[in-house]
Amino acid sequence: MPVFWQKDIETMPRKELERLQLERLRHIVDYADKHVPFYHKKFGALKISADKIKCLSDVKYLPLTTKEDLRDNYPFSLFARPMREIVRTHASSGTTGKPIVVGYTRNDLSAWADQVARFCAAVGVTDADIAQISFGYGLFTGALGLHYGLEKLGAAIVPISAGNTQRQLMLMEDFGVTVLISTPSYATYLSEIAREQGIRDKLKLRVGLFGGEGCTPEMRAKIEENIGILSTDNYGLSELGGPGVSGECAFRCGLHFSEDHFLPEIIDSDTFETKEAGEDGELVVTTLTKEGMPMIRYRTKDITRLDYDVCKCGRTHVRMDKVKGRSDDMLIIKGVNVFPSQIESVLMNIPEIGAHYQLIIRREGLMDSLEVKVELVDGAYLVEYRKLEQLRNYVKEQLRSVLQLDVKVTLVEPKSLERFEGKARRILDLRGK
Ligand code: DLL
């Protein structure tokens, strides 16, 4: 049964929704022009103003905003409100250089909690649920984003943060936790330990709200089987506020955008031309309601596509496909474009190998090469050379048929690769080292 948090908005007829978006687009352009010198300068140079926007597709005349623009304006120069009106900041998890910073007004926090509550309700979470938040609390938007969304919905929150897996499982069992919030990587790890310790039947978990990174349907099936849950994929990024940008409903046929708050487009990353609905490309998003830090045509670098058909659940808001990868994560190996998610799909379909893998890129002469290291489910393979070789060749063949590329495959002992409590870091780039 489809469940809604703000039904009138979530099922608003498209014409009405587009009317609302156009009105909000004009408003946000005018607002950014007046309150953010960076945008005032950009709009001035392009001779753009809100009154020139006649229809939604005119968004293409607005300038694009990039992560570099946010870095150049570190920390607060893109804020549209004075600091006394900013009530929260978050920052990206970037490992090098200065992080990118985002600021929220009280209204932003309230709207954000509603956006998140929608996706929790969409998979059947109610005020009767107990939700364990296993995202790391802090500058990362994941934990506090889900926290306030679930609180608005009325669920009881267990704010345990990431890590200390044994304690996570103990509380899950003792408190009768019904909803798990984490990255899919951490859910993979937690669910494996739960299975090994034979506590699956003692847990009351029924729903997983995963996000912060991609997860193939194959990987998700493994997690769900381990702990007996239904899980959904939830997308967002700090620059746009965090989680709540888009998320799946229980039918899991695309992630509904919060279209009353965000205007999505798909562009070609090289030519910047707008792509048609259904075509793959880079997701670009304009925030329609953010007061603290409005973003005009932010380039997410995430590759996906959009589907405007009304969903079986009744939601009219456009659905984006699961993210195929980030354009800067795409590997070019011997001239072939490879997304790590393609490799994950292949690996997860082979029962003899586990959910943990690593991709190692090296430079050999002028060419890049790829090694796929993956854990065996059963370490006994390692003592039988012939069987091991057969399996290795099989994995290599499966990868070749999907990627059209020869990669080196290394099968390693169970539990020998690193586990992740937050977002996984599976790519080891040794080029230039
Ligand atoms: O990861 C926000 C978030 C937290 C979303 C928790 C959902 C749940 P950042 O740390 O700024 O923000 O990272 C944003 O992570 O551009 C994508 O590349 C990736 N990403 C986030 N969610 C998904 C997802 C949060 N569901 C970057 N599928 C984004 C694929 C995702 N990639």
Image: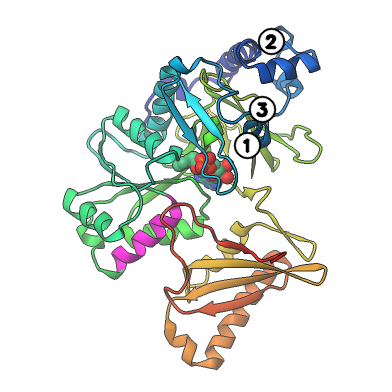
Which percent across, then down, holds residue 356? Answer: 48, 67
Q: Which numbered tag is attached to residue 306?
A: 1
Q: Quadrant of residue 18?
A: top right
* Horizontal arrangement in the rendering, residue 50 relative to residue 15 (left or right): right
* Residue beneath disc 3: 297
Q: Earlier in the sequence, mark 3 or mark 2?
A: 2
Asked whether the viewer can see residue 249, the reply is: no
Which percent across, then down, holds residue 111? Answer: 43, 22
Q: Secondary structure at mark 2?
A: helix
Query: Which residue corresponds to the image point at 45% horizontal and 40% vertical from the top-left?
Result: 140
Circle 1: residue type: Leu
Q: Magenta segment: does it hold 185? A: yes
Q: Nearer the viewer, mark 2 or mark 1?
A: 2
The answer to which of 144 and 176 lies nearer the viewer is 144
Q: Earlier in the sequence, mark 2 or mark 1?
A: 2
Hey, which residue is sitting farthest left in the picture? 174
* Residue extent of the magenta highlight: 183-195
Q: Determine contact: label 2, label 1, CB under 8 Å.
A: no
Which percent across, then down, holds residue 268? Answer: 76, 39
Decide if ligand 1 comes within 8 Å of the CB at mark 3. no
Query: In this picture, is 156 found above or below 63?
Result: below
Q: CA distance from mark 2 to mark 1?
A: 26 Å
Q: What predominant SS class does the magenta segment belong to? A: helix
Q: Earlier in the sequence, mark 1 or mark 3?
A: 3
Q: Quadrant of the N terminus?
A: top left
The answer to which of 404 and 197 lies nearer the viewer is 197
